Amino acid sequence: MMRGLANAASGDSVLRRRLIMATTMLASSMYSLDLTVVSVALPHMQGTFSATPDQIAWVVTAFIVGATVTITLVGWLTGVTGRKRLFTFSISAFLIITILCANAHSLEEEVLWRFLLGLTGAMIIPLSQVIAVDAYPRAMYGHALTLWSVGSVAGSIMAPPLAGYVIEAYGWPAVFYMNVPLAVLGLLGAIAVVPRESNERPRRLDAFGLVTLIVGLGAIQLLFNRGARLDWFGSTEIIVECIVAVLCLYLFVAHSATAKNPFLKPEPFRDRNYTIGLIGAFIYGTMWALPTVMLPLLLQNFRGLPVEMIGILLTPRQLGYLTGSVLTGFLIRRADPRLVAVVGFGLIAFSAFEMSLWSTDVTLWSVALMALAQGVGCALAFIPFNTMAFATVSTEDRPQAVPLFYLVINLGTSIGIASTVTYWTNHTQSTHAMLIEHVSLYNPLIHTMPELWDVGRAAGISSIHAEILRQAGMIGYNQTFAIIMVGAMCAAPIALLFRRARIRT
């Protein structure tokens, strides 16, 4: 009889564990789906709001900036409110603000709601990872993390093509409503199955450390996002933001080193694997989201593809990430995870190199194949980095360590998008100026299409100018993808610095 009761209890525990995992998958899928469908909608939003590429990029950047502000507080808020309440609140707020994003009437309003969406939704990913992993025994950490990673991306595989058809039928605001079913199911699961108990205990908030960290990080992101538009250090605003960033981060580091109860406890940073993981996370963050922002704009503005086709072409990246996640779960049990991460960054570098060779006539097959390779590479790189970074972090330090890890990724993503869009804009302008110098009656290329490029007529000059703009923009994209390749090549050797830790499943 006792054995029967034990088996029944074990069965209940396994069922609850699976329901918790399903809930966290739904919540994290909602978060990742948002970034995916918004990327598909960017070209249409750009037209609606009459925005330039660097302006429309703020729809993504504002979300990440908001997430960066809040994610620093996740560890402390968890101790104050409890993991379950904070998780439930974050999903609820995400649901409400998503609907408000769909009803924005100007770019400024959209950017504001996106900022608030990131502000409230930032807690979803770190909390869902901690909740999912803690539902399993520590010996099954690698298995739980892989399962959560696979489930988190599975829901967004069909999102890009579906978003394309939804936009074509109902307009870009409708893509935000795609998140509503996931949010409702995730909210019900959070209320019903997520345990109320957790290991976190409320601790005194280091207000000075919090304020200096948030202000410093915010100033850095504003500096990178507004620098190109304001001519960098030719602008008083940029100089002030640079001074504020340096001063606040210096005060934060100095205060944290001397305070009895600093906002960020120093214990996780003494773990070699975790510190190396933060460095790799920042570099990974600068490159993982760039194609989701740059590709839709390239495919519509320079390749002339309809939005439905753009959505279909973004699907292989999600499918590749799912395939890579499953493959990674198999490989890290049988091979050195450091080598798996190196292969992953190698795939990212290879795909970026191939993309740097594209022309305006790039085939759809090439776009889909490189998106697939990049998705597989991102999974092979990120999951081993994530697993090795936390393999030796204690359970007590995890509530701080996990949000900080995603904070570093968000910071890298924000800086990466802003810097890359700035670079693309500047390189396009300089290339355009260089190409325009070769427009002459004595250039034999001008005479290859005399019916279109007749410099004696206004229509011909306009046609030449449009083609030069197109080619200059494409060259800018080529150089941008080359930078992603260099970043991936720099990140690969960092994986070899991890101390080998046994990863169990």
Image (tube, helix red, strand yellow):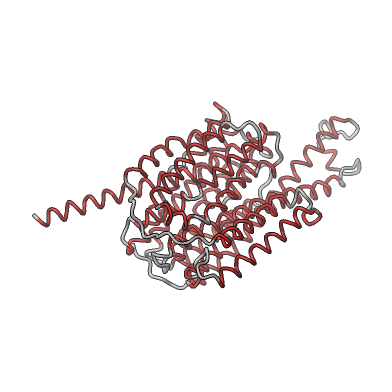
Residue 294: give x, y in percent of width and height: 63, 46
Residue closest to the eye, 78 or 288:
78
Identify the residue at image location x=47%, y=61%: 204
Q: Is residue 149 visible from the viewing direction of this image?
A: no
Residue 306: give x, y in percent of width and height: 61, 33
- Above or below, comparing residue 39 to residue 17 in the picture: above
Identify the residue at image location x=36%, y=40%: 188
Q: Is residue 99 visible from the viewing direction of this image?
A: yes
Residue 176: give x, y in percent of width and height: 52, 35
Left or right: 75 in relation to 465: left
Q: In which quarter of the image is the N terminus?
A: bottom left
Identify the residue at image location x=77%, y=54%: 232
- Above or below, comparing residue 504 to residue 241 in the picture: below
Q: In which quarter of the image is the C terminus?
A: bottom left
Identify the residue at image location x=82%, y=30%: 451
Residue closest to the eye, 241 or 283:
241
Residue 126: give x, y in percent of width and height: 46, 54
